[in-house]
Image (cartoon, rainbow, N blue to C red):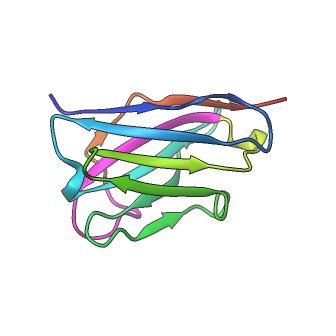
């Protein structure tokens, strides 16, 4: 069964850090671009970051550039999103998604989605 499972969310104070994990089962991530998305209450889902399968090139939304870092460990079949200097506006449910493609990761259709993990930034 193909599955993506996010973990690592939680409650953190402004300025704090969290590391989200996206673990794949039922398939290998080696050939998949991976994206992180988020959706806050009452807002549309937005792309946060992604990493390609071919050369590991990355993309970051302007709102998280310099604060978030995406990385992949193909040996562990897992992709991470390190989030530093968190702000209240980062509060959202974070989803990871996988796309079977060797061509980039930005603005592409994603095939598999996880169930999401809640990130709350509040004092």
The answer to which of 86 and 44 lies nearer the viewer is 86
Q: Position of residue 18 (x, y in %)?
A: 61, 39
Asked if residue 118 is positioned above or below residue 34 in the image, the reply reads: above
Q: Locate residue 78, reporting x and y percent.
A: 33, 44
> The C terminus lies in which quarter of the figure?
top right
* Count of all numbered marks drawn on residues in the image: 0
Q: Quadrant of residue 106?
A: bottom left
Residue extending furthest toward the right:
123
- Pick the residue in front: 120 or 75: 75
Q: Quadrant of the N terminus?
A: top left
- For the magenta stretch, what is the residue range? 92-109
Q: Position of residue 100 (x, y in %)?
A: 20, 55
In the rendered view, would you say 73 is above or below 6? Answer: below
Q: Looking at the image, which residue is at 55% across and 41% down?
A: 19
Location of residue 44 (image quadrant): top right
Q: Residue at x 51, y 52 (%)?
A: 47
Image point (27%, 45%), residue name: 77
Q: Is residue 36 magenta?
A: no
Q: Nearer the viewer, residue 82 or 93?
A: 82
42 relative position to 26: left or right: right
Give coordinates of residue 86: x percent, y percent: 72, 45
Asked if residue 105 lies left or right of residue 59, the reply is left
Q: Is residue 58 above or below residue 73?
A: below
Q: Residue at x 39, y 61 (%)?
A: 51
Left or right, 43 with respect to 96, comes to right
């Amino acid at each position: 069964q193909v599955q993506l499972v996010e973990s690592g969310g939680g409650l953190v104070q402004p300025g704090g850090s969290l590391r989200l994990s996206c673990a794949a089962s039922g398939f290998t991530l080696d050939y998949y671009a991976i994206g992180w998305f988020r959706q806050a209450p009452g807002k549309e889902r937005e792309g946060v970051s992604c990493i390609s399968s071919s050369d590991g090139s990355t993309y970051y939304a302007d709102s998280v550039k310099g604060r978030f870092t995406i990385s992949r460990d193909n040996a562990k079949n897992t992709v991470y999103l390190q989030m530093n200097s968190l702000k209240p506006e980062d509060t959202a449910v974070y989803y990871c998604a996988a796309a079977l493609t060797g061509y980039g990761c930005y603005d592409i259709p994603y095939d598999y989605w996880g169930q999401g993990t809640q990130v709350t930034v509040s004092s």
